[in-house]
Amino acid sequence: MTRLVSIANQKGGVGKTTTAVNLSAGLALSGRRVLLVDLDPQGNASTGLGLPKAAAEYSASTLFTFPEAAANLPVETHVENLYVIEGSLSLLDMESQLADEPDKHLRLRQACSVLAELFSVVVIDCPPSLGLLTMNALNASDYLLIPIQCEYFSMEGLTQILKVTKEIRAATNPSLELGGILFTMYQPEVKLAQEVKDEVMRHFRREVFSTVIARDVALSEAQSFAKTIFEYAPRSVGARNYVELTKEVIRQWSTNV
Ligand SMILES: Nc1ncnc2c1ncn2[C@@H]1O[C@H](COP(=O)(O)OP(=O)(O)OP(=O)(O)O)[C@@H](O)[C@H]1O
Ligand SMILES: [Mg+2]
């Protein structure tokens, strides 16, 4: 069964793309055929893997305008078993272009039914908002991963996305499972980080991944060299953390079938 994974948080800069790229790479290294869908108009996941800017018609926006053409969009990356559908600025037009379409929140699900034939995992990197693109991702997925940074207002953001998830589950996508909340850029020596982590644990203990991603400059350096952390710094803390996360996700999938 193909797993369809959304990586989402409406808050910006919390580690969504870093997690999407390195979890996808970790899953690809484990031998699975993985597709990373870059739903962010910024296209960070695509550039982070060294892909040149795709022409609009070959980017993720086509998943919304011609979902039946989805099979033509994945491009190979330099990582074995890892493919990408690139993000581009044309994704910004989707909100207005699909405004009057009755199925505007379900286009990506239609596209994913085509992609599920070709890949064993589809990871969707969402933009920092709860607009049309993220709604489509949540409706197309069976597993949601929410990266959070331990800062002021993390809890408010988390509560909001969990509420939206519950509504989607009740209305249009009962298969959406909360895979987990992932602490990113964690610095145990920072008091605020500890306090926020404790508060999230008090409310959502069972939903939190045991893996924590530490703040590690190698993770942002890797992105700027268009490499995964496993290529750039395989012995770094960041690489170890993402290996652990990959294993934890695979374990969840094997126990939750
Ligand atoms: N664990 C980490 N340690 C150090 N730096 C990190 C870590 N995770 C992410 N970063 C850096 O923090 C910045 C934001 O990360 P990232 O782009 O993954 O967040 P995002 O949630 O996808 O952002 P956006 O909301 O803009 O899409 C990037 O410069 C990235 O390299
Ligand atoms: Mg991002």
Image (tube, rainbow, N blue to C red):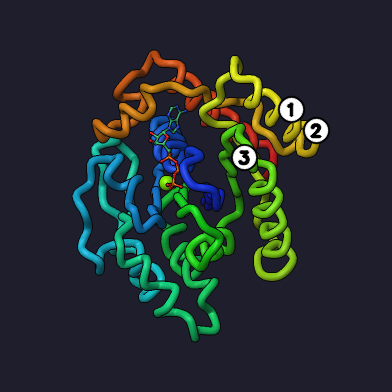
Residue 202 bears which disc, if any? 2
**For residue 149, above or below residue 35:** above
Q: Compared with residue 147, is residue 239 higher up or lower down, i.e. above or below? A: above
Query: Residue at point 43% right, 65% down?
Result: 114
Position of 213 with respect to 209 (left or right) is left
Residue at point 45% right, 50% down?
Answer: 125
Q: Earlier in the sequence, mark 3 or mark 1?
A: 1
How packed is label 2: few (under 14 Cα within 10 Å), some, or many (20 or more)?
few
N-terminal of the pair, mark 3 or mark 2, is 2
Q: Is residue 139 visible?
A: yes
Residue 76: where, in percent of width, then height?
Answer: 26, 47
Label number found at residue 198 = 1
Q: Which kind of residue does numbered mark 1 sit on?
A: Asp
Amino acid, disc 3? Trp
Please give left or right for residue 8 compared with residue 49 in the image.
right
* Residue identifier under label 3: 253
Tell me the CA gap for discs 3 and 2: 25 Å
Position of residue 223 in the picture relative to residue 32 (left or right): left
Secondary element at tag 1: helix
- Disc 1: CA contacts within 10 A as few (<14), some (14-19) or many (>=20): some
Identify residue type, mark 2: Arg
* SS at mark 2 in the image: helix
Report if residue 3 is visible in the image.
Answer: no
Q: For disc 1, does the CB lie below 8 Å from ligand 1?
A: no
Q: Say which residue appears at 53% left-offset and 72% top-offset.
A: 106
| Nearer to me, 220 or 35 | 220
Q: Which mark is residue 219?
A: none
- Give the residue displayed 25% in from the left and 64% down from the top: 58
